């Protein structure tokens, strides 16, 4: 049975470790907000669709000059759209990387500060003797047979990352 259970700290560190593990998944929708096609790109795409539909109504054999003139306009618009797409992709990668780093650093700082702040508070104190592991599990707490915040964060981090690994690749 449990002698002591510090439920607030237990839940607090589980939530922090879960947030830390889900950062790569959270970054995608946040970065998508910044990398949308601009109004100019959408208007160019609409114009290209209009030109393609117009081109389909023209016979290539009968009106070759008009057909090729429209094709040159379509090719020009396609080139512009591809350049804009590459620019948007590189911008998106930079934003994703920046958001990822910032979120990881903020969460890591909160975890480190919290672990330092609550370093002497045991998360769980167990009955019985955990002889070979008792000192390692409780350090720096002085409560016998306790699990310290350091160990709890380590256990939570490894467990949560292992559990979400199959879902993170989806």
Image (cartoon, grey):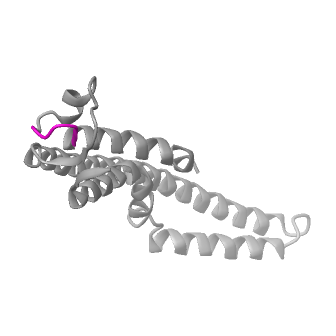
* Residue 68 appears anywhere in the view: yes
Q: Is residue 126 magenta?
A: no
* Residue 91 appears anywhere in the view: no
Left or right of 9? Residue 70 is right
Which residue is at 21% across, 39% downward? 150
Q: Nearer the viewer, residue 141 or 93?
A: 141
x%, y% of residue 89? 46, 52
- Residue 115 lies in what quarter of the image? top left
Left or right of 154? Residue 27 is right
x%, y% of residue 153? 27, 43
- Residue 7 lies in what quarter of the image? bottom left
The span picked out in magenta is 142-147
- Residue 142 lies in what quarter of the image? top left
Q: Residue reaching furthest right?
A: 61
> Disc count in the image?
0
Q: Is residue 65 above or below residue 124?
A: below
Q: Is residue 87 above or below residue 55?
A: above
Specify the principal SS of the magenta part.
Answer: loop
Left or right of 154? Residue 35 is right
x%, y% of residue 133? 27, 27
Left or right of 55? Residue 124 is left
Which residue is at 53% across, 72% downward? 42
x%, y% of residue 14? 32, 53
Q: Nearer the viewer, residue 96 or 26?
A: 26
Which residue is at 64% across, 69% downward? 48
Q: Nearer the viewer, residue 46 or 91?
A: 91
Which residue is at 82% across, 72% downward? 56
């Amino acid at each position: 049975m449990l002698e002591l259970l510090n439920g607030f700290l237990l839940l607090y560190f589980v939530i922090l470790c879960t947030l830390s593990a889900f950062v790569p998944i959270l970054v995608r929708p946040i970065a998508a907000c910044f990398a949308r096609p601009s109004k100019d790109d959408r208007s160019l795409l609409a114009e290209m669709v209009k030109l393609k539909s117009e081109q389909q109504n023209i016979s290539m054999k009968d009106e070759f000059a008009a057909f090729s003139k429209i094709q040159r306009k379509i090719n020009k618009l396609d080139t512009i759209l591809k350049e804009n797409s590459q620019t948007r992709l590189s911008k998106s990668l930079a934003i994703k990387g920046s958001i990822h780093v910032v979120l990881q650093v903020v969460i890591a700082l909160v975890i480190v500060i919290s672990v330092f702040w609550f370093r002497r508070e045991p998360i769980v104190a167990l009955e019985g003797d955990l002889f070979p592991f008792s000192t390692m599990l409780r350090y720096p707490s002085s409560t016998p047979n306790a699990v310290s915040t350091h160990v709890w964060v380590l256990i939570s981090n490894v467990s949560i990352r292992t559990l979400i690994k199959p879902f993170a690749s989806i």
